[in-house]
Image (tube, coloured by chain):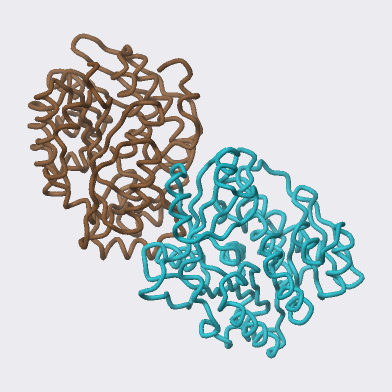
Chain colours: A brown, B cyan
Amino acid sequence: MSDAHFDILGIGNAIVDVVARADDRFLSRHDMHKGAMMLVDSEVAERIYAAMPPGEESSGGSAANTCAVAAALGARVAYFGKVADDQLGQVFSHDMRASGVHFPSSPLIGGAPTARCLILVTPDGQRTMNTFLGACVTLDQSDIDEAIAATALVTYLEGYLFDPPAAQTAFYKAAQAAHAAGRQVALSLSDPFCVDRHRTAFRDLVAGHVDILFANEMEITSLYEENTFEAAADAARRDVALAVLTRSEAGSVVLRGPERAEINPEPTRVVDTTGAGDAYAAGFLVGLTAGKPLAVCGRLGSIAAAEIISHYGARPETDLRKLVGGLV
Amino acid sequence: MSDAHFDILGIGNAIVDVVARADDRFLSRHDMHKGAMMLVDSEVAERIYAAMPPGEESSGGSAANTCAVAAALGARVAYFGKVADDQLGQVFSHDMRASGVHFPSSPLIGGAPTARCLILVTPDGQRTMNTFLGACVTLDQSDIDEAIAATALVTYLEGYLFDPPAAQTAFYKAAQAAHAAGRQVALSLSDPFCVDRHRTAFRDLVAGHVDILFANEMEITSLYEENTFEAAADAARRDVALAVLTRSEAGSVVLRGPERAEINPEPTRVVDTTGAGDAYAAGFLVGLTAGKPLAVCGRLGSIAAAEIISHYGARPETDLRKLVGGLV
């Protein structure tokens, strides 16, 4: 694998987060499902924003978070995603590059603004997300540089990418380029409602094009329409070479053929769960691309997730390499 | 005073903060004075931003921070400041209004972008600021609604306002409107380098138009070109009706004619000192406009400052009214 220029290539919705605190009443008043991601148009986004408390802005986006965390752990990382040529797009681009991520995507000029995710964090640390996709919806196959997909050990796709209509073609193009070069393709299911919206497309993609599947308990049971975690995990084991299943405070379960690893979560104080799954995927993939055993990959994921959960925002605030010690 | 519609009217540079962590070497490599505010043009701002680690954006500006904290403490607050008609201007406006601050200023259209302050926080919690004034420099007397200045108990001006050339006239217009209505005018000196840049203008303003002066030790000794805190404090006592002097971990000293109150700081863990002085002024003014004794005003300032220092960013993250208990 010495010809690989990148350990990880992430592809996803390039989004700036606006994080504010809110109580449960605010969520119900605005018909939000706690813990879920809802797509909103610009009008609804304006209405929610007008009602929101003062916020803090930082770069987000599921796969982009994973890339930033992986780069902070020392991996070589590239990212494709579409921002607009505006102030928030500049913030996003700056943050990716300042994180050490190669980010070659050209911004959209003269179209919709950079995507925004309005995130309400309740006192229990749960985040509820309202995404206005903006410039993201224009990501298409012309944004996929196949040469980069061919030189990355793992091409990592976020499930949210299935929401913008043109992105599915980008998705398949990247997966094909990666496989043609003998690389691996990973997918994160992102959100149970996202799985609901695109179940058939996800099933086809997972069975036919995905080597590594990341999902939490609600997502994997929704994908396979099973009632129990174990039944869904069995289905995943049959579909993909490697299934990485997270279960919040119950830790994570990793399945590779007959192999099964169970990993405890790192103890931490929960402040804001935004980006926890993204960070777990980052730690896991950093371990995997460095050739570590599954249990070590899972521990790297748990440590990275614990750091992200302990403060507001989805990007690391402390030196992750120090935190994981000698593990990578 | 029952005809007052506002307790506090703040006037200042409307700025969005970009906060990132940096070490001392980063500061010296970019010729920054630790703890100070430096004005930069757009080119230098671009250069510093390109070299900065990933950041978090939030609304800032010295008097704007004071207004947000005062509103969080339950005061009736208005603010004048100039943003541009762009994304960061919308963020600033949203955050002021969501904080409960009346913010009637119209944005600048088709000119410079919203002002930005690039803030580097070193591991000792000190913040070093690089401000690109952008749209701020267009604030002038046409932005001063004299009717509002006439109905606010205290009109609070930040010293930084002396940097944009047109703002001095706005400054004097607001002070005159306030005094004509029998209200009080407060000034914060903002920064020792700002005092250096405008010492003569500040001396004239303080002696002739200011009732309440806020300054820290370096600012007050710079203003009066004295070597000791006590000598400078004596000079301030002669110049203004009320001098509120902060001394970091040594607490604060408040002088009103023959009266002298000394207030201990609240114990807290220092994470980021950005906005500490702004929050102190807010707490103090909330107490003062509620008719509290000087020692209580100082304690309110210390409690508000301690909250701001304990996390990244200059705006409150916890319920300040709960924190100050029965004090207001």
Q: Residue at x 28, y 25 (%)?
A: A7
Q: Nearer the viewer, residue A40 or B34?
A: B34
Give percent across and percent down for residue B284.
72, 64
In the current view of this chain or complex, which residue is farthest to the right? B258
In the current view of this chain or complex, which residue is farthest to the bottom? B180
The answer to whether residue B161 is left or right of residue B295 is left
Q: Quadrant of residue A109?
A: bottom left
The answer to whether residue B283 is left or right of residue A71 is right
The answer to whether residue A115 is left or right of residue B5 is left
Q: Quadrant of residue A35?
A: top left
Give percent across and percent down for residue A28.
35, 55
Give percent across and percent down for residue A177.
11, 30
Does A114 appear above or below A274?
below
Q: Quadrant of residue A81?
A: top left
Does B1 appear above or below B234?
below
The N terminus of chain B appears in which quarter of the rendering?
Answer: bottom right
Give percent across and percent down for residue B41.
49, 61
Q: Residue at x 43, y 43 (%)?
A: B54
Q: Residue at x 67, y 87 (%)?
A: B176
